Amino acid sequence: MKQKQEDINENKRIEKTVYLCFSTDIIHGGHIAIIQRAARLGKLLIGLMTDEAVATYKRFPILSYEERRKIIENIKGVSEIVEQTTLSYVPNLLKYKPDIVVHGDEWKEGIQAPVRQEVIETLKTYGGQLIEFPYSDNEEYKILEKNAVTQLSIPDYRRGTLKKLIGLKPVVTAMEAHNGLTGLIVEKTVVYDQGSAKSFDAMWISSLCDSTSKGKPDIELVDMTSRFTTINEIMEVTTKPIILDGDTGGLTEHFVYTVRTLERMGVSAVIIEDKKGLKRNSLFGTEAQQTQDSIENFSEKIKAGKKAQQTDEFMIIARIESLILKRGVEDALKRAFAFIKAGADAIMIHSKNKDPEEVFDFCDRFREQDKQTPLVVVPTTYNSVTEEELQKHGANIVIYANHLIRAEFPAMQKVAISILKNHRSLETDSACMPIKEIITLIPE
Ligand code: SPV
Ligand code: MG
């Protein structure tokens, strides 16, 4: 009789489907314990987050989806693995209708709370159940995660993450950073909206912002040694891939050294623009005297850089200034194909028009002939365009080139003015972040 009851229980157990989402790439005892507990409730379906989903909400995964899948499918108790492509569980819950969703109870608070709420509401629609296990705050596991972050900042790992992201995401976004603090903002800012997460994928070390933060004009006056110091400062406290605005690249004889240094540092890409002589910021357009380099000279510079390059992951990106200098889309296309022939890994097309039409035109015509080479765009002046629209026209990387410094300057100036006017700081206190908050930004 006892045997029979156990059989019935066993059958009931098998009937239930249990869903457990996994995003981690460091599998430890805590994960095994939760898998075992979940498996006791029924047939265990693991929703394994894709690399893109993990990279967007947490950090770049050290182990790829495939590697993680191989490990998890061999853990006792796991019946099946399915892809979870978003932070939100909803698409998978509606698709697989698991009877039970299992999670640690730590997600009741903080960034995951809206994701949890969505799970509860979706389960309600078909009579599913959420089971939460008490979360154990194990110090050892926290150290493992810290070590993973350290590993991500190692040059040999960091360098390749840009190429990987281009392969993973429909569009890669980069935000400018000009010091450790702005680097931390790019690294850590995440926005959660309806169960999805969005953060910047990469950092742009702008010549304009690096120069401006030093109170200098953007004319290649801040030398490479100083630019390397800025990069280093940012790298020390962040892990996301770095794209350097390399201005004109300087003399070809100098550029080859720059390439090697950047690779050694773990920078992912350098973008050099096809200008020569005294470089002025592109947003001056034709108001400033600027000279475009010849296709031949610039191609030679690219070729030399590619020859000097030691790793496969580093990218040399050619930036075309034809639209800035009002030479038209035809000239820009001619240059793009010549620079790719010279070895450029991607093309950046720049424009200072208010609307994106000429950039769209360039991208569409470029994509008619080349479906592969990544395209980079910088929508500073044509800023009503969305990332999705740019992506539809074939753009792969969208750079927000100068926004943090432009936000910083007026905010600081306003505070300075208020203190001068009031002879005290009380009136401006609400415009300043409390010290308690600002220190939470800084890693220990
Ligand atoms: C920079 O950010 O320094 C750039 C982009 O080169 S732009 O300022 O638009 O020329
Ligand atoms: Mg620049």
Image (cartoon, rainbow, N blue to C red):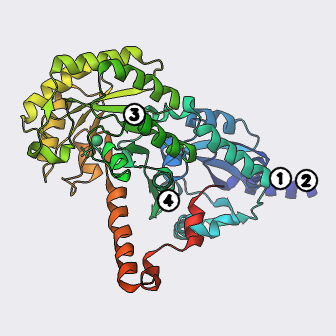
Of callouts 3 and 1, the N-terminal one: 1
In this rendering, the answer to whether 283 lies above or below 301 is: below
Callout 3: SS = helix
Could you tell me residue 438's position as x and y percent? 55, 66
What's the residue type where badge 4 is placed?
Val
Disc 4 crowd rating (10 Å Cα; few below 14, some 14-19, many 20+) is some
Q: Nearer the viewer, residue 144 or 350?
A: 350
Nearest-to-viewer mark from 3 and 1: 3
Q: CA distance from mark 4 to mark 1?
A: 33 Å
Marking on residue 7: 1
Could you tell me residue 346's position as x and y percent? 30, 29
Q: Quadrant of residue 166?
A: top left
Residue 25 visible, this orientation = no
What's the residue type where badge 1 is placed?
Asp
Callout 1: SS = helix
Q: Which residue is mark 2?
A: 3
| Left or right, 67 with reference to 262 | right
What's the residue type where badge 3 is placed?
Met
Q: Quadrant of ligand 2?
A: top left
Q: Which residue is mark 4?
A: 90
Q: Residue at x 72, y 52 (%)?
A: 142
Callout 2: SS = helix
* Image quadrant where one finds the C terminus: bottom right
Q: CA distance from mark 3 to mark 1?
A: 73 Å
Callout 4: SS = helix
* Image quadrant where one finds the N terminus: bottom right
Nearest-to-viewer mark from 3 and 4: 3
Nearest-to-viewer mark from 4 and 1: 4
In this rendering, the answer to whether 249 lies above or below 143 is: above
Q: Residue at x 51, y 32 (%)?
A: 266
Q: Which residue is mark 3?
A: 224
Could you tell me residue 38's position as x and y percent? 73, 54
